[in-house]
C-alpha cells in the first residue's frame, strides 16, 4: 500500500502543495476569499457574465419551468427543449452543422479522442496542451506523439516520420497557462495536406476572440472544412458551465452513438442551458465587452513592461508573469495577497519544471484603476 501521507509531505516540501480556497461571494473583481476581501485577478470570467443579472434571471426562470436536475442522461429523457435550443444556437454561432453538449470541457475532450481514435491510430499534440487533451489521447490507446510548442516545422517532421492511415492533430486554441494562440491556419494546411483530423480546444478563446466572439477559428476566418472538430467551453467567457463539440452532422451523430462521456452521464440541468442562451445573446450583441477587455490587457502589458516584469507572448486575457522557481512564485503570490490582491502561482506539473509563474487573468468587470492597483502591488511584491 502506498504511503499517501509521505507523498503529500513530499509535495509540500517541493512547494507543489495545493488546496481549495473558499469563496463567499459571486465571481467579480472584489471577492471574499477565505474570509478576506481581495481584488481578484485569477478568474476565467473574461466577459464578466458569471454574475450578470439577465443571465441570473434566465437561470431562475428555467429552474421554475424545468426544475433543478435533468434527471437522466441526454439519450434517456434528460435532453430538454432548452438543451436542444442551445445546441442549435451554438451551431449557428460557430458556423457548424451541428453541436453536441457535454457537462465539462474535460469530458468533451475525452469523448473526442476515445470515440474517433483507437490503438492503431496516431494523435499529434502540442507539448503545452491542456491535461484533458493529453488524458483523452492516453485513454484512447492511440499512439501519442508530442511536438514542440507551436512549432510547425517540428510537427511536420513528426508526421512524416510517423505515417498513419488515421491520425489527428489536437491543440489548444488559446493556451491556458501561457495565453498565446496556436498557429491554427498553418495547422489546418498541414492537416489537409496529410488528410488528418484537426481538433481545436478553444476553451479560452470562445467568447473572447473573433468579430462576434466565436473564438480563434472565427478570428482567423477558418471554416468547418479547415477545422473539422471544434470544442468550446461555457464556464469561462460565457459565465455559465459545460462545454460543446461543434462539427459536421456525421461527426456529431457518431459521437452521440459512441462517445461514452456523453452517453453514460446525467445531462446538465436545463437551467444551465437556459442561462447560457441568455449569455450567448450578450456575447453576440455587446461587442464593447471585448473592446474593453483589450484596453485592459494593453494597459497592463505597458505598465508591466515598464516595471521590467517578464511577460509572455500573449494578447489574450491570460497574462502570465514568468518567475521560474516555484518557492519564489508562491512567495510573491502570498505577498500580493497580503496587499489585497488575489494572483495565483502556477507550478509544475501544470507547467514545465522551472517555469512557475503568476497567472494573471482579466475580466471586463475590472477597471483601469484596478489594473493600476495590481501593477503597484506587483512592483512591491516582485521588488522585495
Image (cartoon, helix red, strand yellow):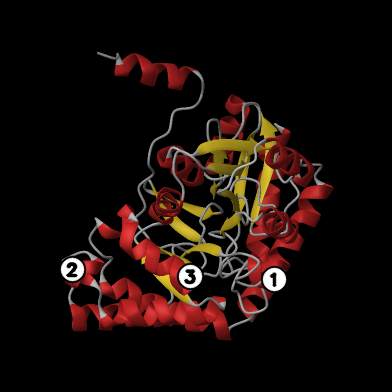
Q: Secondary structure at mark 3?
A: loop
Q: Earlier in the sequence, mark 3 or mark 2?
A: 2
Q: Earlier in the sequence, mark 1 or mark 3?
A: 1
Q: Is residue 55 among what the camera can see?
A: no
Q: Whole-Å distance between the Cαs marked 1 and 3?
A: 17 Å
Q: Secondary structure at mark 1?
A: helix
CB contact under 8 Å: marks 2 and 1 = no
Q: Which one is closest to the eye, mark 2 or mark 1?
A: 2
- Quadrant of the rendered image containing residue 161: top right
Q: Whole-Å distance between the Cαs marked 3 and 2?
A: 27 Å
Residue 219 image label = 1
In the image: residue 183, left or right of residue 270: right
Where is residue 151 drawn, in percent x and y? 75, 43
Q: Earlier in the sequence, mark 2 or mark 1?
A: 2
Q: Quadrant of the N terminus?
A: top left
Q: Is residue 382 among what the camera can see?
A: yes
Where is residue 137 drawn, in percent x and y? 48, 42
In the image: residue 325, left or right of residue 70: right
Q: Is residue 76 above or below residue 175?
A: below
What residue would you read off at disc 2?
A: 76
Front position in the image: 50 or 141: 141
CB contact under 8 Å: marks 1 and 3 = no
Where is residue 218 drawn, in percent x and y? 65, 72
At 60% from the left and 51% from the top, the residue drawn is: 171
Outermost bottom residue: 285
What residue would you read off at disc 3?
A: 238
In the image: residue 146, left or right of residue 11: right
Q: Quadrant of the C terminus?
A: top right
Amino acid at each position: 500500500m502506498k504511503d499517501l501521507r509521505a507523498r503529500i509531505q513530499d509535495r509540500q516540501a517541493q512547494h507543489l502543495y495545493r488546496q481549495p480556497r473558499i469563496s463567499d461571494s459571486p465571481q467579480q473583481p472584489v471577492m471574499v476569499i477565505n474570509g478576506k476581501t481581495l481584488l481578484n485577478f485569477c478568474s476565467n470570467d473574461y466577459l464578466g457574465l458569471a454574475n450578470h443579472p439577465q443571465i441570473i434571471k434566465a437561470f431562475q426562470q428555467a429552474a421554475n419551468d424545468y426544475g433543478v436536475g435533468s434527471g437522466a442522461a441526454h439519450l434517456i429523457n434528460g435532453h430538454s427543449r432548452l438543451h436542444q435550443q442551445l445546441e442549435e444556437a451554438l451551431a449557428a454561432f460557430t458556423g457548424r452543422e451541428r453541436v453536441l453538449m457535454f457537462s465539462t470541457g474535460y469530458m468533451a475532450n475525452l469523448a473526442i479522442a476515445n470515440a474517433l481514435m483507437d490503438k492503431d491510430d496516431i494523435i499529434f499534440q502540442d507539448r503545452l496542451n491542456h491535461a484533458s487533451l493529453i488524458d483523452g489521447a492516453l485513454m484512447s490507446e492511440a499512439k501519442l506523439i508530442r511536438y514542440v510548442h507551436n512549432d510547425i516545422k517540428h510537427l511536420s517532421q513528426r508526421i512524416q516520420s510517423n505515417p498513419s492511415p488515421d491520425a489527428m492533430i489536437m491543440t489548444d486554441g488559446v493556451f491556458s497557462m501561457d495565453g498565446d494562440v496556436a498557429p491554427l491556419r498553418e495547422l489546418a494546411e498541414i492537416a489537409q495536406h496529410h488528410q488528418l483530423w484537426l481538433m481545436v480546444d478553444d476553451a479560452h478563446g470562445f467568447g473572447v476572440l473573433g468579430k462576434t466572439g466565436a473564438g480563434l477559428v472565427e478570428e482567423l476566418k477558418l471554416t468547418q472544412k479547415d477545422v473539422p472538430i471544434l470544442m468550446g467551453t461555457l464556464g469561462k467567457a460565457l459565465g455559465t458551465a459545460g462545454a460543446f463539440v461543434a462539427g459536421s452532422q456525421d461527426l456529431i451523430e457518431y459521437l452521440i452513438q459512441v462517445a461514452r462521456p456523453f452517453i453514460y452521464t446525467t445531462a446538465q440541468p436545463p437551467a444551465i442551458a437556459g442561462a447560457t442562451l441568455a449569455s450567448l445573446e450578450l456575447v453576440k450583441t455587446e461587442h464593447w465587452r471585448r473592446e474593453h477587455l483589450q484596453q485592459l490587457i494593453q494597459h497592463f502589458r505597458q505598465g508591466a513592461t515598464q516595471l521590467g516584469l517578464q511577460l509572455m507572448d500573449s494578447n489574450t486575457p491570460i497574462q502570465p508573469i514568468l518567475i521560474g522557481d516555484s518557492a519564489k512564485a508562491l512567495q510573491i503570490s502570498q505577498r500580493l495577497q497580503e496587499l489585497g490582491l488575489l494572483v495565483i502561482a502556477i507550478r509544475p506539473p501544470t507547467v514545465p519544471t522551472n517555469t512557475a509563474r503568476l497567472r494573471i487573468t482579466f475580466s471586463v468587470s475590472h477597471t483601469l484603476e484596478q489594473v493600476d492597483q495590481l501593477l503597484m502591488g506587483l512592483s512591491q511584491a516582485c521588488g522585495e
